[in-house]
Image (spheres, rainbow, N blue to C red):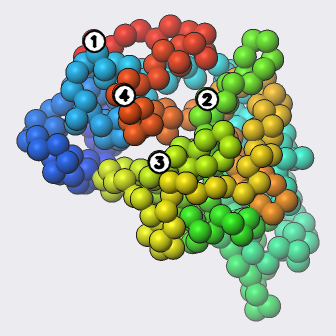
């Protein structure tokens, strides 16, 4: 990582969350606050590990540099992985939600409208069928730039149309109605599955990981960066771990804070359709070999919310998924067919 990148990170870091997270790590590990801060700084400088990765990989507890090196890092390893498995053109198709929706139209399971090319008449036609819809910035990430719009008989449609254009909220989508069986683990917002797929040279699709993402309190999105949690899903659709979150600090949540439903052992509905579905998705843009798919479960089956062209590694590598403290670096090299330089930690 270059000197400029390191300096820019200093000025853009979320210091409030970092300090709060570090205070929790101090309680969990018994180590000193400044010892942990310095250690996180070293791991970022030497290996490219973010503070969130440090927390989720339990580096406050796992101090052996050889074990730490078995976990891939966001700024070194993931950059190599993404670069080796995509092109700038293929990434653009996933970065822009309007382009993505056109390519994956048959898999969306919902109506959508691109306001950048639609007329006000098109908008009025769309909202005549969708009084509730989601408006998104085409290139928004992490749940930012997403609004849930609810219209009624008194709504000024011309004003709404103009406001959406002014705010850049040009991707409109019919609201996804989640499967009733998912509300036990996500009563306030749409609950999604994050599934990482890697297209192999022989045309087969490797499913790298499957995770449930759920909101703890956010009424709109389940993004981990907004305080949501995630858990590992077995091949037959059963949650295997408590939900872990790193915002505002690392927590392992055994029961949903609103419904009281226990995460471990929860069986996801309609899951028998999911793996075949994502394998189909993974073959539509072969130049983008690696994708982190966000999938919703509805009464009719799985539907794709979006595909992430640069999915972070932490959802795959959280330490609780590797109880022997050996991370999946070797598996990453095998699945992607690349060699990841061993960090000098």
> Crowding at label 1, few (<14), some or many (≥20) Cα neighbours within 10 Å?
few
Please report whichever mark, 2 or 3, sits nearer to the chain's N-terminal start.
2
Report if the CB atoms under discs 2 and 3 are less than 8 Å apart: no
> Which residue is denoted by mark 3 in the rendering?
241
Q: Quadrant of the N terminus?
A: top left
Please report whichever mark, 2 or 4, sits nearer to the chain's N-terminal start.
2
> Crowding at label 4, few (<14), some or many (≥20) Cα neighbours within 10 Å?
few
Report if the CB atoms under discs 4 and 3 are less than 8 Å apart: no
**Of 217 and 180, the residue lying toward us:** 180
Is residue 131 shown to the viewer in this render?
A: yes
Is residue 98 shown to the viewer in this render?
A: no
> Which residue is denoted by mark 1 in the rendering?
344
Mark 2 lies on a secondary structure that is strand
Apparent side of residue 332 relative to residue 106 in the rendered image (left or right):
left
Q: Quadrant of the C terminus?
A: top left
Please report whichever mark, 1 or 4, sits nearer to the chain's N-terminal start.
4
What's the distance in space between the residues labelled 2 and 4, CA to CA?
Answer: 19 Å
> Which residue is denoted by mark 2 in the rendering?
208
Farthest front residue in view: 265
Apparent side of residue 95 relative to residue 63 in the rendered image (left or right):
right
What's the distance in space between the residues labelled 3 and 1, CA to CA?
Answer: 31 Å
Q: Position of residue 237 (x, y in %)?
A: 66, 47
Please report whichever mark, 1 or 2, sits nearer to the chain's N-terminal start.
2
Report if the CB atoms under discs 2 and 4 are less than 8 Å apart: no
Q: Position of residue 195 (x, y in %)?
A: 64, 39
Instruction: Identify the residue at horizontal 90%, vertical 47% (top origin).
Output: 106
> Which residue is denoted by mark 4 in the rendering?
324
């Amino acid at each position: 990582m270059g000197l400029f990148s390191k300096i820019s990170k200093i000025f853009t870091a979320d210091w409030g969350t970092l300090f709060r997270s570090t205070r929790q790590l101090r309680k969990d590990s018994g180590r000193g606050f400044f010892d942990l801060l310095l250690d996180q700084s070293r791991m970022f400088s030497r290996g490219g590990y973010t503070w969130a990765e440090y927390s989720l990989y339990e580096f406050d507890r796992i101090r052996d540099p050889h074990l730490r090196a078995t976990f891939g890092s966001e700024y070194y390893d993931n950059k190599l992985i993404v670069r080796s498995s995509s092109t700038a053109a293929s990434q653009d198709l996933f970065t822009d939600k309007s382009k993505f929706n056109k390519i994956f139209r048959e898999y969306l399971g919902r109506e959508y409208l691109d306001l950048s090319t639609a007329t006000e008449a098109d908008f009025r036609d769309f909202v005549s069928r969708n009084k509730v819809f989601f408006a998104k910035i085409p290139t928004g990430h992490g749940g930012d730039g997403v609004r849930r719009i609810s219209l009624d008989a008194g709504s000024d449609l011309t004003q709404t149309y103009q406001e959406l254009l002014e705010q850049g909220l040009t991707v409109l989508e019919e609201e996804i109605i989640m499967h009733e069986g998912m509300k036990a683990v996500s009563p306030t917002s749409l609950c999604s599955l994050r599934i990482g797929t890697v297209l192999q040279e022989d045309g087969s699709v490797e499913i790298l990981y499957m995770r449930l993402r759920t909101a703890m309190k956010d009424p709109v999105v389940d993004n981990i960066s907004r305080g949501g949690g995630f858990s590992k899903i077995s091949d037959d659709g059963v949650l295997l771990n408590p939900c872990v979150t790193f915002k505002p600090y690392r927590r392992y949540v055994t029961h949903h804070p609103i419904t009281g439903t226990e995460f471990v052992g929860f069986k996801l509905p309609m899951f028998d359709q999911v793996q075949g579905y994502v394998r189909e998705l993974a073959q539509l843009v072969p130049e983008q070999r690696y994708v982190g798919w966000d999938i919703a479960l509805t009464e009719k089956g799985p539907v794709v919310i979006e595909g992430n062209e640069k999915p972070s590694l932490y959802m795959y590598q959280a330490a609780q998924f590797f109880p022997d403290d050996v991370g999946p670096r070797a598996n990453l090299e095998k699945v992607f067919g690349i060699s990841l330089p061993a960090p000098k930690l």
